[in-house]
Amino acid sequence: MESNNEGKEREAAVSCIDVSLTARKKTILNKVSFEVPKGTITGLLGPNGAGKSSLLRIISSLATASSGTVAIFGEPAGEAALRKLSLLPDRGGLPGWQTAAQWLAFAKGIYPDWDQVQCEQLTEDLKIASHTRISSMSRGEEARLQLLTCLSRTAPLVILDEPFTGVDMISREQIASTVVGALADGTRTFLIATHDIREMELLFDHLVMIGNGEIKAARKVDQLRQQGKSVEAFYREVFA
Amino acid sequence: MDEGMPLLFEEFTLNPSRPIYEQFVEQIRARIVSGIIPTGQRLPSVREFAADKRVNPTTAARTYQELERSGLIVTYRGQGTFVTGDMEIIGKARAELARAAVQELKRTAKALGLSVEEMLELGEKED
């Protein structure tokens, strides 16, 4: 019984085994295998076109791999896994004609795990102007609203795809602080794809490097720093 | 923090090539030993500290663990974390920092082919 519990404790939030994706004869992902340990902030790093978004879409069950397996907290990815994860997609898609408040009321209705108390707290922390129409928001404001939507759910896995693209510095700082605050006591796991390392390098505790659709390296950030390497230096080493 | 005494220097920049918790520990220790952060001062929670500095929460937790191990800060369950009031512990930490600085001084002097006294004398001399 005890060993059973221990196994659960160490179960990965995300586990990919030999995930491949081919589209129109082009290989987008080639036998990708890695794990995201529970309770970590794992960075998925790689240049543009490396396959990060495709991989995240597969992990989020929005796309299907050509081969290989993906497990979310030990269960196969698919419709049933959707309630366990909250995705911030690259390039928004929030309805521009609504105000922030209208959008959040709608989101509350569609997500069964919506936490209204959390939503109100985050609205304050992230300084969201409730009555601003989404179409008239800056990129930074819209990114903050997207993050707010993501984190107002209690889903244990949060996946952020390039949360910083085109976002101003103050918004970046607010987003980073909010991510740290939302990690709470290790009950949540973050998988964050970015090519913008400097903003995030102090946040990550695990790294997965992806290039040309293949995993190039996976490391603990602590170990890199013990060797005198920054995340950025390691990134250069892997991709130079 | 409650009374507005920041744990770190405003302009403190982190070196991303060194363990982050080590840098926090060094900074906070120096600020406690020099009295900039007074004894009995309440520290922010690990979570607040991590969110404020935008670092991984385990980095913040590790920082507090190290400082607690040396006795410089103390956590009272349900009340929070405070700078120790034990002057002996603070004195010991101060002596340790002084010893390390003197060692460094000796190394530098040796590299210059001087005794520490000679180096100090040379360094104080006006051109």
Image: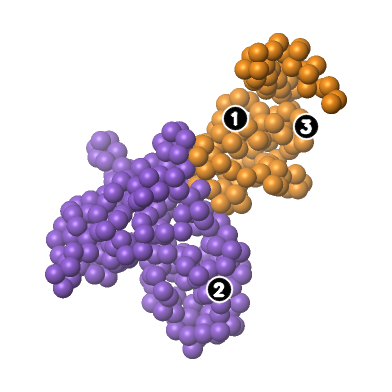
Judged by depth in the image, the label closer to the viewer, 3 or 1, is 3
Tell me if I can see residue B21 in this picture: yes
Instruction: Look at the numbered disc 1 and give the secondary structure of its residue.
Output: helix
Question: As rendered, which of A27 and B57 lies closer to the eye?
Answer: A27
Same subunit under labels 2 and 3? no
Q: Position of residue A108 (x, y in %)?
A: 44, 75
User: Do residues under tags 2 and 3 come within 8 Å of each other at their CB atoms?
Assistant: no
Amino acid marked by disc 3: Gly
Considering every residue shown, the one lying at the far right of the view is B126
Which residue occupies 62% across, 45% down? B13
* Residue on which the image places disc 2: A141
Going 70% across and 43% down the picture, which residue do you hit?
Answer: B9
Q: Subunit of mark 2?
A: A
Q: Quadrant of residue B86?
A: top right
Q: Residue at x 77, y 46 (%)?
A: B3
Specify the quadrant that holds the N terminus of chain A: top left
Please name whichever residue, B86 or B66, is drawn nearer the observer in this view of the structure: B66
Q: Residues within 10 Å of mark 2 (few under 14, many from 20)?
A: many
What amino acid is labelled 2 in the image?
A: Glu
Circle 1 residue: B68
Q: Is A5 drawn above or below residue B127 in the view shown?
A: below
Q: Compute the Cα span from label 3 to label 1.
A: 17 Å
Residue designated by label 3: B35
